[in-house]
Image (spheres, grey):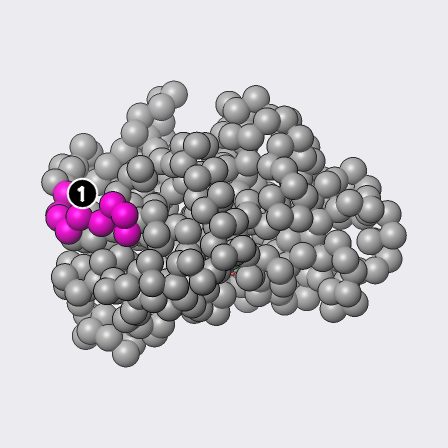
Amino acid sequence: MFTRHLIDLDTVSIDQLNDVLDLAKVIMKHPQYFCDSGHGKIMATLFYEPSTRTQMSFQSAMLKLGGKIVGFDNPNSSSVSKGESLRDTVRVVSNYADLIVIRHPCEGAAQAAAMFSRCNVINAGDGGHLHPTQTLTDLFTLINTKGTLSNLTVGICGDLKNGRTVHSLIKSLVGFKNNKFVFISTPQLAIPDYIKKIVIDAGCKYSESASLSDSISKIDVLYMTRIQRERFENDEEYKNQKGVFILDKEKMKNAKYGLKILHPLPRIDEIDYEVDDDSRAVYFDQTEYGMYVRMALILYMLENSEKKLDARPESNSEKCCCNPRCITNHELYLPKLYKKAEGREICEYCDHSQPICSK
Ligand code: NCD
């Protein structure tokens, strides 16, 4: 059984993960057996940030299960535009829906939403932090195209600092046997230290590279990502980073025959269109796998969908999180919660690690 909410895959055991992936496989093979499984249930999609695939694949998944959907994809069309807090919106919507899927520009927003929801909450992306259901999609794609989640050398290229899909994927792949990573990025967009620590603590090897051409021949899976323009302080900085890594036919000449290229999409310019016809490019298949795995996830979550408000934890610190994009700096009523590790405080919402902050 899952924990009540899916905020981060680290609350899901490998066995549970395999159960969801196995169920997704059965659903993909026999979708007709499941066309009434969500009958009478309502899923709300609260998208405070733009989305095509995640929102539509969740909605298609629920409709294919025979359930119904409500929600918004533009907070300006809801009471959010009148100044309604996240806690009130979630509290109200959870009276209508059996499951809430939320995407928000602030890191830790899904965690915050879960504190005020009477129904289960799924994190569909919180700022540059995490995106666990994209990871389920990525894992399901790997199973179907590579046949395994172990013994892989995984190259991850692009905006490793702000790419939430990257963070969730690495956190999950370290749990499988003998995976290695090649992080390909500019120094400015390098993988955050807290993710490196997770890789090291799991006993996995990694290397860092500034060249896709130099790395491509060594890897079994290439996970390309776009530079996350919306997470930059200004457009000048974005322009300096854009276009540095472009996968094209020329680079593919040095890639392994069995390489699989994944991308959470949307693509901007980081994969040339000419690569789409290469049989190693699986990023469009990936979008379809995402729908089946979300059908499986919805069924799992609905199975455990008792309506209740959980007891809310009390603040264990007076201090504000030093991450300006943390939800606690935007929804000021939230309890301030930190874990302590190695002389630092780690925000429970956004994972930002800070020395004692004086603010
Ligand atoms: C990703 C996201 O929103 O984080 N897209 C997605 O969910 N499929 C990747 C991105 O926006 O670059």
Q: In the image, what residue type sits under mark 1?
A: Pro
Residue found 52% across the figure and 49% down from its top: 25
User: Percent from the top left, x then y, of residue 59?
Assistant: 39, 67
User: Percent from the top left, x then y, of residue 78?
Assistant: 24, 75
User: Percent from the top left, x then y, of residue 190?
Assistant: 59, 43
| Start-end of magenta stretch | 302-310
333 or 15, which is in the foreground?
15
Residue 282 shown left or right of residue 139 in the figure: right
Residue found 38% across the figure and 21% down from its top: 342
The crowding category of the residue bearing disc 1, from other C-alpha atoms within 10 Å (few below 14, some 14 to 19, many at least 20), is some
Task: Identify the element where label 1 is drawn.
Answer: loop
175 is higher (above) or lower (below) than 52: above
Q: Quadrant of the N terminus?
A: top left
Q: Quadrant of the C terminus?
A: top left
192 or 233, which is in the foreground?
192
Magenta segment main secondary structure: loop
Residue found 59% across the figure and 50% down from its top: 141
Residue 227 visible in the picture: no
Quarter assignment of residue 273: bottom right
261 or 163, which is in the foreground?
261
Residue found 30% across the figure and 29% down from its top: 339
Q: Is residue 309 magenta?
A: yes
156 is higher (above) or lower (below) than 206: below
232 or 14, which is in the foreground?
14
Residue 334 shown left or right of residue 72 in the figure: left
Residue 298 shown left or right of residue 198 in the figure: left
Q: Residue furthest front?
A: 33
- Give the residue pinned by disc 1: 335
Residue 5 visible in the picture: yes
